[in-house]
């Protein structure tokens, strides 16, 4: 297999995120097989019986009602349809989109990319990224949310266990950049601490339930969303 090359990332990345796809692709050829590829996209259908799937340079699409184990990629996005069942999802450069009613028994971990959890979706463990927006709508996250630079919007009757943790980015300066925006909408429940090691703009609905907050001052709002919150 041809040697894969990766550009250095300009920030500190958790080791758990970087320990990603290579073992899944280690025994495949240049284009790999249906489950593991170096170059190319992977499509998981509901008719297949699937274990782990992985690509280095390619995206992964999981159909509605499909079942899979781990979906791992380095340079690519992961799209999971509605009412699918899987374990964990990991990517370095790519977004993750989870469809309605889909259940993951593990976690979602990425570095550069957006995350979207649709209504009724369930992530049993943690949700983690470094850069990119996160949109959670009437979904469940069982192991908390961890990030550094993300704009985060939680809405509907979403239930987040394990709190929210914003880490201080490597080389961070409070004098540069616009602080991330965190919006916790009406009907949302966040169990556990909300811990912010960096400045954020935190907006919390008067109809949301949250745990103790450290490192930020919540701005309470009424209605569906804060009127003065601009990205």
Image: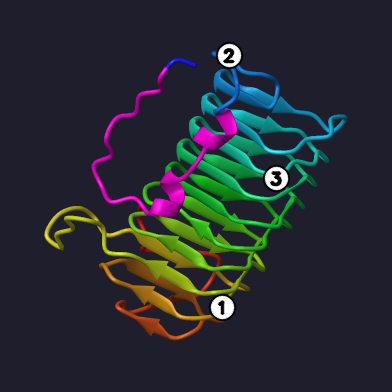
Gap between marks 2 and 3 measured at Cα = 28 Å
Residue drawn at point x = 43 percent, y = 76 percent: 194
- Residue 111 image-quadrant placement: top left
Residue 45, image x and y in percent? 80, 29
- Which label was assigned to residue 82? none
Residue located farthest toward the left when viewing the structure as drawn: 175
Q: Mostly what secondary structure, the magenta segment?
A: loop
Label 3–label 1 contact, CB within 8 A? no
Circle 2 is placed at which residue position? 31
Q: Position of residue 225 (x, y in %)?
A: 50, 64
C-alpha distance separating marks 2 and 1: 48 Å
Depicted 159 relative to depicted 51: above or below = below
Numbered range of the magenta stretch: 3-25
Residue, disc 1: 208
Q: Dot 3 lies on which element?
A: loop
Q: Which residue is mark 3?
A: 99
């Amino acid at each position: 297999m041809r040697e894969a090359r990766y550009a250095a990332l300009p920030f500190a990345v958790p080791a758990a995120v970087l320990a990603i796809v290579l073992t899944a692709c280690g025994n495949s050829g240049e284009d790999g097989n249906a489950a593991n590829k170096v170059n190319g996209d992977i499509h998981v259908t509901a008719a297949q019986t699937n274990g782990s799937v992985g690509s280095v340079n390619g995206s992964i699409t999981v159909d509605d009602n499909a079942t899979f184990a781990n979906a791992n990629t380095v340079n690519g996005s992961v799209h999971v349809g509605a009412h699918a069942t899987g374990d964990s999802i990991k990517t370095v450069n790519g977004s993750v989109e989870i469809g309605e009613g889909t259940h993951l028994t593990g976690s979602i971990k990425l570095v550069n990319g957006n995350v979207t959890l649709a209504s009724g979706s369930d992530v049993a463990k943690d949700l983690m990224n470094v850069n990119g927006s996160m949109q959670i709508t009437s979904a469940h996250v069982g192991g908390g949310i961890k990030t550094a630079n993300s704009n985060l919007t939680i809405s509907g009757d979403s239930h987040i266990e394990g709190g929210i943790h914003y880490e201080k980015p490597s080389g961070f300066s409070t004098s540069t950049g616009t602080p991330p925006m965190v919006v916790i909408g009406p009907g949302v429940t966040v169990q556990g601490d909300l811990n912010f090691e960096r400045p954020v703009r935190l907006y919390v609905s008067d109809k949301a339930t949250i745990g103790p907050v450290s490192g930020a001052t919540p701005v309470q709002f009424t209605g569906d969303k804060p009127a003065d919150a601009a990205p």
